Amino acid sequence: MTVTTQGRRASEGGRAQRPQNTGGRSSSPRARPSRARPLVGYGRWWWALPGLLLVLGIQYTATSVGGFFAFTNWSGIGSFEWIGLENFREIFQDPEKVRALGNTLLLAFGSVLLTNVFGLMLALALNRGLRTRYALRVVFFMPVVLSPLAVSYVWKFIFDFNGPLNQLLAAGGLQELQRPWLADPNLAIWAVLGVIVWQQTGIAMVIYLAGLAAVPVEIEEAAAIDGASHWQRFLAVTVPSIRPAIAIATTLGLVNGLRIFDQIMALTAGGPAGATENLATEVYKEAFSLGRFGYGAALALLLTVLILVCAMLQQYATRDRSKES
Amino acid sequence: MFRYTKATALREALTWVAAFIFLLPFYFLVATALKSDQEVFASDPIAPPTNPDLSSFVAVLGQQGQSNVLLGLLNSVILTGGSILCMVLLGSLTGYVIVRSTRRWSRGAYMLFLIAIVLPTQLGTVPLYIGARTLGLTGSIWGMIILYTGMLLPFAVFLYAGFFRGLGTEYEEAATIDGASRAQIFFRVVLPLMAPATGTVAILAGLIVWNDFFSALIFLGGSENQTLPVAMYYYVGSLVSQWNQIFAIVIVSMIPILLLYLVAQKRFIQGFAGGIKG
């Protein structure tokens, strides 16, 4: 029993990618006493208790209580009644909330698609050969570290009717393309999407760069010698080897894209006329500005279910793909 | 196969063109912030400032009350630092025990943390706000540190667990033979070996706390403990089209994190590229 446990541990240690494990500072790695495990100090179980209790309290209890209030008409103070699915009926009968749901999905899937396409293109461009690839990587990743709020203010100025974008269009002789970007109900959501893509493409890029580093060069060379075109090599060699990177980048983008909040608050505050509201901004408005806690909780529950379903579907899709290969 | 050919040079040039277009927003940001009040309204938004002056920065840094930028900066530093400390301590302890334990509960506990990573904060925010209000913790920096630690701990545990799995047990065995106690083994042998993990946790979680707006607005908004993003939000809300002043506060808010990024860019990028995988 003891021996098998140690064997598993040792093999795990051997598989480790972290460089510090290979050094092995221990004085006599082989000379373990055979009954060492119960004696070796691995820490006490209760060391995990503060962390567990904190997460149980702040995440699980709070989320469960929030889920409970989703079925009530509580205003945040005083008494409340259990009203069953009434809040959800109200959500789906209100065209503004249905549009917010649509915007949530548009921003999530739109940002996942665009950041991954641009991120992969940048990663492929930077991957090999470029002399300044590290400097370029630093440049394209830079917006990721900035606050979405600050970035959105910059873009609000750029999209202003008298702002740089329209001025640049005029300078290029394209006056007829000038638009009130953030004030047009049909365009504003796309402007918000553009800002998200600008800021988050760097995340996808570095994930793909890490993935591309693992693409076996020999196979690519062999394919090139066999006369495979660039595109064939990309599809047959590169894409299969970066599947884990694709899974990570899309899951991360989807979960983050569903809960976009700062960008909308800074760029349009949900306007014009509610055209750029998503579920996260509606939760904030209903629960905290209008004091409709029960209704806000119902919207938040909808968002939570959406995120959990998307995360699970994503997990399922990636698991399937790895079995295929 | 990877010789530097004319095609490579062309690719390099095109990527730099893309990079300059990509960076244009930063040009507008700096150029506009350096304009005076009159020039911002009169001039072309693309043109560089004719007489660069720092009057907008002076106006921004002198703000009092709800949009006190310097106080916001201080609060953000305390809040981020405190949250990182708590997250590193609790995250490493929890991740370590979960990975090293062979009991069944540790698998369940690990799943608990994994699920909590994708659990969105919105639904829990309403009850947490009411709980905090009842306890008088809204507007409190300490309450906020506990809150952020609880929200981001699953992520820290996940990262640490990944690193601890890759650490062989020889160190603990050697230290035990040398007579170290369990606490000594963890804090003086194991945790120092985890410096790369600690760096990743500090950067990724610290960045989230530093840039967070949603929770900070709800729990700290209107109090004297507002963080920088909240102070910025209120300040910008009080201005109409005074883009030079808006951009001065935007620049002030960006400088600390940009400096840190340029110094430690490799860690940031590796954190995002590899840390997420765990």
Image: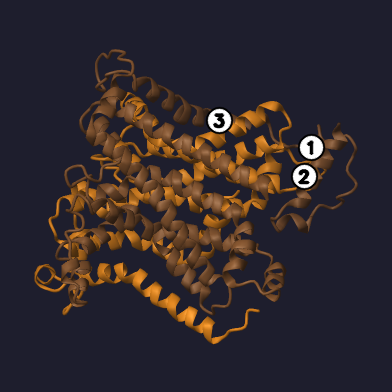
Same chain check for tags 1 and 3: yes
Q: Is residue B25 above or below residue A18?
A: below
Q: Which amino acid type corresponds to the residue marked 3 in the rendered image?
A: Leu
Residue displayed at 66% across by 31% down: B107
Q: Position of residue B9 (x, y in %)?
A: 51, 84
Circle 3 residue: A52
- The quadrant where residue A1 appears: top right
Q: Locate residue A84 relative to residue B53 in the image: left or right.
A: right
Q: Which amino acid type corresponds to the residue marked 2 in the rendered image?
A: Thr
Same chain check for tags 3 and 2: no
Q: Locate residue B245 relative to residue B267 in the image: left or right.
A: left
Circle 1 residue: A40
Q: Position of residue B105 (x, y in %)?
A: 66, 26
Q: Is residue A13 above or below residue B131?
A: below
Q: Which amino acid type corresponds to the residue marked 1 in the rendered image?
A: Val
Q: Colour of chain A?
A: brown
Same chain check for tags 2 and 1: no
Q: Which mark is residue B169?
A: 2
Question: Which structural element holds mark 1?
Answer: loop
Q: Position of residue A195 (x, y in %)?
A: 32, 57
- Residue B82 can be seen, yes or no: no
Q: Residues within 10 Å of mark 1 (few under 14, many from 20)?
A: many
Question: Which structural element holds mark 3?
Answer: helix
Q: Which mark is residue B42?
A: none
